[in-house]
Image (cartoon, rainbow, N blue to C red):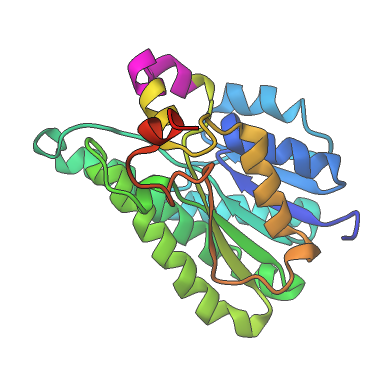
Amino acid sequence: MMQNNTALVTGAARGIGLATSQLLGEEGWTVAMVDRDESALREAADSVSSAIPVLCDVSQPEAVERMVHAVTQKSGRIDALVNNAGVADFGPMADTSFERWRAVMATNLDGVFLCSQACLDALKKSRGCIVNIASISGYRASTLRVAYGTSKAAVMHLTRQQAIELGEFGIRVNCIAPGPVKTKLAMAVHTPDIIAAYHDAIPLNRYGSEIEIANAIVFLCSDKASYINGQILGVDGGFEASAIGLPALRKCN
């Protein structure tokens, strides 16, 4: 990897996006950090070497066009796009208004489409890559996730559509599907019962960390993944592969 490679990471002010930005910075990338939370973005960018902070709501087409133009004007190129920005709105289907549904889709799905489309010219020039961030909820249906889970399943399929169409330009497109991750937000809203239930369902018997997800993202951005295209990589401790019975089986060991 050349030292002047540029990655554009959305939702970069916290969590997985920040961890990914920091790791890319450590590996010599210039990182365009994109978020709609101005104060959080400013603070996060201070922790990343060669950061280009850009304020943008990825659900707004004109804002995305301006953001990508600003990044290319400053860096001269885009070699990797990490579509990480997302919102989580959990609730019963009966209580999910169309406004709530659209708010989730606007960021989680429309944002991925808009950013990818806006970056196409730059990615064609660099023969770069796209890494979309979905969720294990795109694989496994669960209560209270009618909008969130559906948006992430759509991101998985969009990844395959992009990979098929863009491969001829040398652009690789892959997807990361994180399982439960030990973020500040998750720990604030997950009760001890929820945490125990997740541990029971995950073969590794623990949540993942933000850096573990970031490691997978950075790998897919690197030349080491040069022949990986159209894939959905679950980074979930085996959660998607497991069925039922783990607690009972562990008692036998």
* 239 or 143, nearer to the observer: 239
Horizontal and vertical percent position of residue 80: 69, 59
Instruction: Say which residue appears at 36% left-offset and 46% top-offset.
Output: 137
Q: Is residue 36 above or below residue 163?
A: above
- Residue at the far front in the pictured view: 252
Q: Is residue 231 above or below residue 11?
A: below
Horizontal and vertical percent position of residue 160: 47, 71
- Residue at the far right in the pictured view: 3
Part of the protein shown in magenta: 185-195
For residue 35, what is the image quadrant?
top right
* 182 or 151, nearer to the observer: 182
Using the rendered image of the protein, determine whether residue 54 is visible from the camera's viewpoint.
no
183 drawn magenta: no
Q: Is residue 131 left or right of residue 45?
A: left
Q: Is residue 100 left or right of residue 19?
A: left
Magenta: main secondary structure: helix
Using the rendered image of the protein, determine whether residue 164 is visible from the camera's viewpoint.
yes
Instruction: Say which residue appears at 59% left-offset and 36% top-offset.
Output: 16
Horizontal and vertical percent position of residue 176: 54, 53
192 drawn magenta: yes
- Residue at the far bottom in the pictured view: 168
Q: Is residue 228 above or below residue 27?
A: below
- Residue at the far left in the pictured view: 94
Instruction: Say which residue appears at 45% left-offset and 74% top-offset.
Output: 161
